[in-house]
Amino acid sequence: MAIVNTTDKTFTEDTKEGVVLVDFWAPWCGPCKMIAPVLEELDGELDGKAKIVKVDVDENQETASKYGVMSIPTLLVLKNGEVVDKTVGFQPKEALSELIAKHA
């Protein structure tokens, strides 16, 4: 599965089913750039157990605000549209993998 870039308009549709890791990021954010290849690698290993969506906070402030995103990267785990977990800042792949596995 490929990582989906979602928007304020498509967020609900993109996150309503199953386990979804949501990455709130911005192009100017250093730690966000560091986590991007980690998410790419993780996406290749998830094997359909979960999907990853990215939200550019500069372009989608409504969604960022709705979920109380104050600093980025903020990663939320949603299960069937509901937030079940959250982590802020750069995380190694193992930590993200465990975060998803708890809910998958």
Image (cartoon, rainbow, N blue to C red):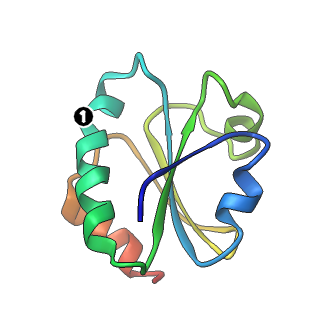
Query: Mark 1: few, some, or many residues within 10 Å (few <14, many ≥20)?
Result: some
Residue in view at x 71 percent, y 29 percent: 61
The spot of residue 96 in percent (x, y) is 31, 62
The foreground one among 104 and 68 is: 104
The spot of residue 102 in percent (x, y) is 41, 81
Quarter location, residue 43: bottom left
Q: Which residue is mark 1?
A: 34
The foreground one among 98 and 10 is: 10
Q: Is residue 12 above or below residue 32?
A: below
Which residue sits furthest top? Answer: 28
The quarter of the picture where the N terminus appears is bottom left
Residue in view at x 60 percent, y 29 percent: 57
Residue in view at x 44 percent, y 53 percent: 3
Q: Is residue 88 above or below residue 99?
A: above
Lateral position of residue 63 relative to residue 23, left or right: right
The spot of residue 92 in percent (x, y) is 20, 53
Quarter location, residue 56: top right
The spot of residue 88 in percent (x, y) is 42, 45
The foreground one among 73 and 26 is: 26
Residue in view at x 74 percent, y 49 percent: 10
The quarter of the picture where the C terminus appears is bottom left
Q: Amino acid at mark 1?
A: Met
Which residue sits furthest front? Answer: 1
